[in-house]
Image (cartoon, rainbow, N blue to C red):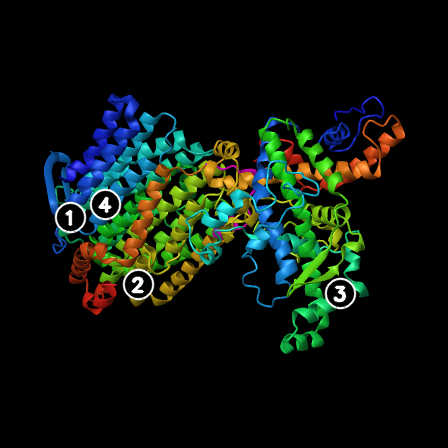
Amino acid sequence: MTITTATKIPPSTHEFATVIHRLEAGGAMLPDTPENLMQIIGLYKAYAVPMDFYWRDLLYIAEQVFLDPLPAFKYFLPQEYLDLANHYAGDDADLRIWQKGAASAHPELLEFMEKGRSAKMPKIFHHLLHDRINMEFAEACMQAMYWQRGMGGQFDPYLDTEEYKQNADRAIKAYFKGNPAMLGLYKLFPEMFIEQVRQMSYYSNLGLFWEVMAPVFFEMSDLYDAGKIKSVPDAMNFLVNGIFAVAGRPIYHHVYIRGELFEIIPKSCGFTWLYEAALPYVEAVFYRTAPFRGTKSYNAQAEQVPGEQKDFHYGILYADVNPVGSAGIPPTLLMDDMYHFLPQYLLDYYEQHCRGKDDMLIQLGVSFQRSMYCVTSAVIQALRGALLYPLDDPNPLHLQANRDFFESQIDRFKRPEARLRDIQSQEYR
Amino acid sequence: MLSSIIWLPVLGALLIGLLPNSSRLIAGITAAASLAVTIVIAAMFNYQDAGLQFIEHLSWIQPLGLDYVLGLDGLSLPLVILNALLLFLAVQSTNKEVDRPRLFYALLLLVGAAVMGAFLAHNLLLFFLFYELELIPLYLLITIWGGERRGYAATKFLIYQALSGMVLLAGFLSWAWFAKTGDFNYESLAATHLPANLQLLFLCIILLGFGIKMPLVPFHTWLPDAYVESSTPVSMLLGGIVSKLGTYGLIRFGLGLFPDAWVIVAPWLALISVVTAVYGSIIAIAQTDIKKTIAYSSVAHLSYVLLAISAGNSLSVLGAVYQMVAHGLILALLFNLVGIIEAKTGTRELAQLHGLLNSQRGLPFVGTMLILTMMASAGIPGMVGFVGEFLSFQGSYLAFPVITIICLGSTGLTSVYFVLIINRALFGKLEENIIYLPKVQGYERVPAIILAILIVLLGVQPNIVISHVQVTTDALVAGVSQDSNTLALLKVNQSEFPTGLSL
């Protein structure tokens, strides 16, 4: 999909004209270099394994743990959810994206859950030592989406409807049946319980979103290893095609209480993956609020926190992944999670740069940032495809409309904190 | 045996000239050998004997009264060990890629040898020779390998130090002439008794000479420039040991030889010390260059030594010696760490340094050591600085309570400027323009680790030093009291502090 518009409309005068032209030519915001490709694909692979855990556990919490007031074991995934068939992998898949893999949990994930990075020991010790997948990261992503409400779509407004409240009410009463204390509390503070159910709905939303993304990333890694993805645009186009393929996947929230199904958000509501999960996720986590603990703290009194939520710009596309060392905080839980599953070629690559093993978490954080710029490029291209015109449209007015769209998207990266400038250079590590 | 620890570094300097490709190795070996012999001497030292030990006496130029007399007592022993140690560590702290390594290492060894000679010399002219001998190599070390303003700093250093030497020489010559001893041997001069007015005159001359060396306000202006412009190993030697020649001289030649006059000048010295302490601390707070802050902190902390010496009692003089050791270790480590920071980040400016404690890409080892050293400098218990200040202030309080309390207040200012450095340079977010810092290599950590161990060890077990020093300092003060009824007012019997000394 290499297309040029240079002869049909004049060059862009945007600050990021090179990036705009690249997008217009069917490329990504990330420059197309073998090094970038290796980094983003390696990171997709390393991200996909913990993501396979995230989506399963998110659904487990949304569907089974639900309103447990003391959910001490919510990260202890039962076998049922490890075996849960991914709808986009395995022989029985609705739409098989990951061609080589099974529908149940990834073997590398199972091996890591068994042994951890240290030694085989009872699950509780793995948990307490953080020698496990850090589900806290996934929960923080969910909270970011929930906190940044009102980002468009129909899913979020639905959570405030009377229909939703009635569905939640039924589930709450069923869940606490025979528990007069909790039912009494519910009587006293109904909104508090409804609020918890809304959060559970976002657990489900994110779980269903990542259920798609995990096989997408696994497949991209397999294709790269097989030499079938040869450039950054190839990778981006695979994502764009994947987005379109699963755009209509239903987003819902089901709860299972004592074997009975409660549809808090039924599939019949018609909420779909692209508009109700993917776009809010990208907006909340990529742009507005990355749950990257310890990367930076903000001083509200110094007006470092914007008054409007839409002006937040603390997502991964803006984050400085270098942690604040004085607090001794590791550079995010996700980086730790990905570190366990890095392909060998990335380990070798990181060893050669900066401080090698000593700052590998930061290096992979930067690679993650690059890979998320590629995902964001795919989303921008998908939106352009859905809302505007083909890149090879012969009409200059249409091409200009495309350009206006690209420029308005890229305007969001004019802020000094944005890493778009940095990722243009290979030296940013 | 004492000669060996002076001449081993000189031999090393000569060997460097003969074997040009192994200058660092030779410097390291000879400095290590000198340190090893010093440790052997320390092990053989009889700490119950207040007199000179390991005496070496050779007649040299008899018409001038210049004899080669070396000796070691409890006053010079800790400083000799400190000098040998810092020389070794200074060699280790030198950048492996230093320009003109042969000359650099040779000059470094010569400085170490000269300072060693000055601490061991018991002939005033011999002391003067060694005292002046370190001047030329230090001048060259600053002017060739120094920072941007090295020429200015080196010239200023040379002028002040030469002036200090000239004043001392004038004092020594006129004193020997009046005393009519026929030589410059310390023991001969100590045996004479001059009238109080002459004592006062000679003491003032000597005070001026050593006051410039220490330095005291208002003769301090050479120090910040020299310390800041020097390269790391030279700063370590300058701040760690060379400055101790001044305080050592005050005890050895001032308090030891002019007891009557000392009583008269002591209150004035205490006054100068408190002015120096407060001035140095306040100026240190105002600095934005870490090395300059440390330089002014050195001025303030050495004034505690002067206060303790001026009190002139057994506890305070013991504290003064301990504080010299503490100051030497702490300052050397601070300069070593700042040197690493500058080498890695390219700056010492607080405005440009943030988040160095960053565990992934910062300098966590250096940051941790810096906090430890600054705590030691601020007198936190459990570290060597606390013991030095505790003994010094406890002793000086008996003679100058108000001044001691003000000096105690100035130790609080130490915490202020060091907390400012810690807060700005170590905490917070690593500046993005220094995000790709090179790693601190293993060999670069060695000097800091050794110094940090000593700082903690001597903080929890001060008797290691005190047991070797106390008899000599007690004898020194006891000698003073026999000669002066007035000073007896200032003297505190050592038996009043048995528990305090065995911390």
Query: Which numbered disc flags the more N-terminal residue, 4 or 2?
Result: 4
Marks 4/1: CA–CA distance? 11 Å
Is the Cβ of the residue at disc 1 closer than 8 Å to that at disc 3? no
The mark lying in front, picked from 3 and 4, is: 3
Q: Which amino acid lies under the numbered mark 2 shown in the image of this protein? A: Ser
Quarter of the image with the N terminus of chain B is: top left
Marks 2/3: CA–CA distance? 81 Å
Q: Tell me if residue A303 can be seen.
A: no
User: Residue A195: image x %, image y %?
Assistant: 70, 65
Q: Secondary structure at mark 2?
A: helix
Q: Secondary structure at mark 1?
A: helix
Residue name at image x 20 percent, y 33 percent: B8
Chain ID at mark 4: B
Q: Quadrant of residue B135?
A: top left
B425 magenta-colored: yes
Would you name the residue on which mark 2 appears? B396
Is the Cβ of the residue at disc 3 closer than 8 Å to that at disc 4? no
Q: Residues within 10 Å of mark 1 (few under 14, many from 20)?
A: few
The mark lying in front, picked from 4 and 1, is: 1
Residue name at image x 66 percent, y 47 percent: A210
Q: Nearer the viewer, residue A292 or B419?
A: A292
User: Residue A133: image x %, image y %?
Assistant: 53, 50
Same chain for marks 2 and 1? yes
Would you name the residue on which mark 3 appears? A167
Q: Which residues are magenta?
A: B422-438
Same chain for marks 4 and 2? yes
